[in-house]
Image (spheres, grey):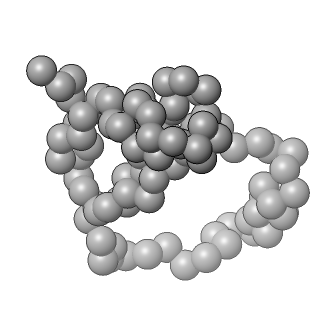
Amino acid sequence: MEVPQIIRTYCPRCRKHTEHKVTLYKPGKRRKLAEGERRYIAKKKGYGSKRRPEQKRTAKITKKQVIKLKCRECGYIQHRKGIRIKKLLIVEKR
């Protein structure tokens, strides 16, 4: 699916419609010392077993892509919940 590089939409900080730069959201590296990560590592620890049973068949073949919008005036970043698509292409509007 093709998405334009610049979208004109509402900015909650500016309280008006402004141009937003569009990028694809990618999660950052997980912190090893975060409480949830420590709990996950502790649960995984043991003799040969996994924390959860490994899934044999996956039901879904796509992921929900999240779009990150950055206001060009104030720099406020907001996320827009995406739809299920295999590939998201950000194209320059001609």
Given residues 70 and 73, the one toward you in this image is 73
Count every numbered label the image shows and give the total: 0
Residue 82's spot in the image, x, y percent? 37, 57
- Give the answer, above or below, for where 72 lies relative to 13: above
Residue 62's spot in the image, x, y percent? 29, 61
Q: Residue at x 61, y 76 (%)?
A: 52
One can see residue 10 in this view: yes
One can see residue 46 in this view: no
Quarter assignment of residue 91: top left
- In which quadrant will I find the C terminus? top left
Given residues 72 and 34, the one toward you in this image is 72
Residue ranking furthest to the front: 16
Image position of 25 (left or right of 38): left
- Give the answer, above or below, for where 40 lies relative to 21: below
Quarter assignment of residue 89: top left
Q: Residue at x 69, y 43 (%)?
A: 30
Residue 87's spot in the image, x, y percent? 23, 46
Given residues 19 and 33, the one toward you in this image is 19
Q: Residue at x 58, y 44 (%)?
A: 15
Residue 49's spot in the image, x, y percent? 66, 72
Given residues 86 and 69, the one toward you in this image is 69
Image position of 18 (left or right of 52): left
- Give the answer, above or below, for where 91 lies relative to 15: above
Image position of 80 (left or right of 2): right
- Give the answer, above or below, for where 45 lies relative to 93: below
Residue ranking furthest to the left: 94
Q: Residue at x 51, y 31 (%)?
A: 71
